[in-house]
Image (cartoon, grey):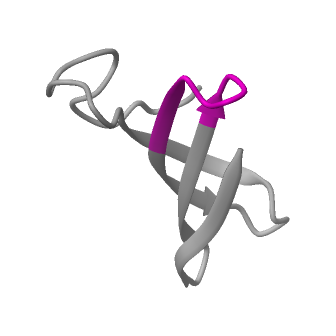
């Protein structure tokens, strides 16, 4: 898994995430995470926007945000 911040403003961050499964990678997933932190620095809100390269739109769970919790 790799990740890098794309944008941070106040208590909100957008993070680009990559996950490769297999050796060599047989499947690759890419996500954008939107994270909102509370004043103590703990996650208050989390959204995942998945992208599955090489798969048609709507494959897997693609197609919109997936709020956690």
Residue with the most extreme bottom position: 9
Q: Nearer the viewer, residue 43 or 49?
A: 49
Q: Quadrant of the C terminus?
A: top right
Where's residue 23, x and y in %? 72, 27
Where's residue 11, x and y in %? 61, 74
Quarter-of-image position of residue 62: top left
Where's residue 32, x and y in %? 45, 52
Q: Quadrant of the N terminus?
A: top right
Quarter-of-image position of residue 40: bottom right
Residue shown at 14% from the left, 28% from the top: 57
Residue with the most extreme right position: 40
Where's residue 15, x and y in %? 55, 62
Q: Is residue 15 above or below residue 6?
A: above
Q: Is residue 55 left or right of residue 44?
A: left
Residue shown at 61% from the left, 31% from the top: 25
Instruction: Provide the residue span drawn in magenta.
Output: 20-30
Residue with the most extreme left position: 57
Q: Is residue 41 above or below residue 46?
A: below
Q: Is residue 69 magenta?
A: no
Residue shown at 76% from the left, 69% from the top: 39
Residue shown at 51% from the left, 25% from the top: 27
């Amino acid at each position: 898994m790799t990740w890098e911040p794309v944008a941070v403003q106040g208590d909100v961050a957008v993070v680009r995430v990559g996950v490769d499964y297999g050796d060599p990678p047989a499947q690759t997933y890419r996500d954008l995470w939107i994270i909102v932190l509370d004043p103590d620095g703990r996650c208050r809100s989390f959204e995942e926007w998945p992208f599955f390269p090489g798969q048609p739109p709507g494959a897997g769970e693609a197609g919109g945000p997936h709020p956690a919790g």
